[in-house]
Image (cartoon, grey):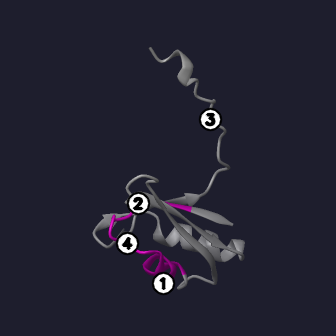
Amino acid sequence: MQIYVGNISYSTTEEGLENLFSQYGEVEAVKIITDRETGRAKGFGFITMNDDAAAQNAIDELNEKEFEGRTLRINEARPREERPKRNFNNRF
């Protein structure tokens, strides 16, 4: 199951999130989303756990909990929605 983790501190590391979630089961992957231009964290990320029951337990236990000074917003990740293509030819 892929888990969305929002409202994380900009100083939070992938290792820190992995340590937090590994208390509930095996973490397969951790990805904090960063801005392409600046490289700065955007304040959210994703955790992948193979065991759906462990993942749901982590969601239930950690949602609305404080971590590194921020109240986490955690839920099952939804599939990414396609964004419409931008047309830069008609900007001016």
Q: Which residue is mark 3?
A: 83
The Cα atoms of the two marked residues, 4 and 2, are separated by 14 Å
Q: Which residue is mark 4?
A: 12
Q: Which mark is residue 66?
A: none
Q: Which residue is mark 2?
A: 39
Callout 2 amino acid = Gly
Tell me if residue 66 comes above or below residue 80 in the rendering: below
Within-10-Å neighbours for mark 2: few <14, some 14–19, many 20+: few
Local SS, label 3: loop
Tell me if residue 55 comes above or below residue 64 in the rendering: below
Please report whichever mark, 2 or 3, sits nearer to the chain's N-terminal start: 2
Q: Residue at x 64, y 51 (%)?
A: 78
Pointers 4 and 1 in contact (C-beta within 8 Å) = no
The Cα atoms of the two marked residues, 4 and 1, are separated by 11 Å
Queried whether the magenta region covers residue 50, the answer comes back as no
Q: How many marks?
A: 4
Callout 4 amino acid = Thr
The Cα atoms of the two marked residues, 3 and 1, are separated by 33 Å
Pointers 3 and 4 in contact (C-beta within 8 Å) = no
Spot occupied by residue 9 in the image (x, y as percentages of width and height): 34, 65
Q: Residue at x 33, y 64 (%)?
A: 10
Please report whichever mark, 4 or 2, sits nearer to the chain's N-terminal start: 4
Which numbered disc, 4 or 2, marks the residue closer to the eye? 2
Within-10-Å neighbours for mark 3: few <14, some 14–19, many 20+: few
Spot occupied by residue 32 in the image (x, y as percentages of width and height): 49, 65
The Cα atoms of the two marked residues, 2 and 1, are separated by 23 Å
Pointers 2 and 1 in contact (C-beta within 8 Å) = no
Q: Which mark is residue 19?
A: 1
Which numbered disc, 3 or 1, marks the residue closer to the eye? 3
